Amino acid sequence: MSAQTVSIPDDRAFASFKAECLCEEGWSMTYTKSGIVVWTQSLEEGKSVHKIKCRMICKDVSAEIMYDVLHDIEYRRKWDSNVIETFDIGKLTVNADVGYYSWKCPKPLRNRDVITLRSWLPIGRDYIIMNYSVKHPKYPPKKDMVRVVSIQTGYMIQSQGPNHCTLTYMAQVDPRGSLPKWVVNKSSHLLAPRAMKKIHKACLKYQEWKQRHNPGFKPWLYPEQTTLPSIPLSELSIQRAESLENIDESSLAETQEREDSD
């Protein structure tokens, strides 16, 4: 995608994302336990951009259910305990939209939010969902939140059989702030594996939940169902990190808080 203008990812962008999800060169493994592996990529000293990649093998979830769970915004509000607010702003094409997401950060850090252009593509029996940050005139940064820049974030789901899939999550993010070392370590050793486990647990309960909540409504599969207003690309611009507040939280000490049970 161009550095200057907002564009909808093409097939080459999806292929490039898939290749990076599968590539292990240049990544350091920081965690491996119970079918979940986490890698991080060290970046230049002084840079605030973080790159993390997680992979989870699920031997009791189909790729199709995983794809539905990662798309279903109503269900996300139920299972994602970190979410503060999430909603879709509008659609761009049959497989691209713009949305808002805000989430709780480990105390005493300030909470974060992001506006992203999200696009998705089934490739055979595999699926990719990916996003990057954009600016929308109606949703400027909020005073009580730190606006994060997603350079490229997304999921790749690979079908390994009828009820068996592999989920890879990869994030290249600028959190807009000098973060303390404990946050970076906690992300790879605790927060990322816990997030993957939550997704897995959510997948196991999804079919039962969906039967009771508008079971036929899946606009990510059936775009004719969407009720979102159309947004012209001209309304959007690239979210540049330099235009956002940069805060220094590097000296903040970790506070003990009650951890969610896995």
Image (cartoon, rainbow, N blue to C red):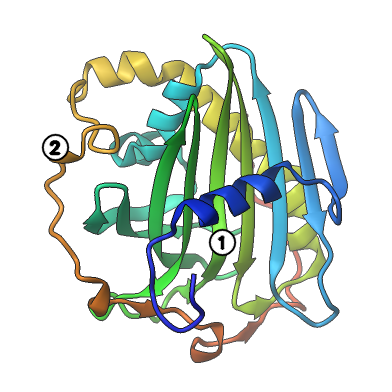
Could one spot residue 191 in this view of the protein?
no
Q: Amino acid at mark 2?
A: Gln
Q: Nearer the viewer, residue 166 or 175?
A: 166
> Of helix, strand and loop, which one carries label 1?
strand
Q: Of label 2 and label 1, which has the lower sequence position?
A: 1
Q: On the image, numbered disc 1 is attached to which residue?
A: 152
Above or below residue 240? Residue 199 is: above
Task: Answer left or right for 96 relative to 239.
Answer: left
Position in image of residue 207 (x %, y %): 35, 15
Residue 229 location (% of width, % of height): 13, 58
Residue 261, horizontal then vertical, whole percent: 61, 31
Q: Tell whether label 1 touches label 2 (CB within 8 Å).
A: no
Residue 32's place in the image compared with 172, above or below, is: above
Q: Quadrant of residue 135?
A: bottom left
What residue lies at 78% left-to-right and 36% top-to-bottom?
Answer: 37
Residue drawn at point x = 52 percent, y = 71 percent: 148
Q: How many marks?
A: 2
Residue at 76% in and 68% down: 253
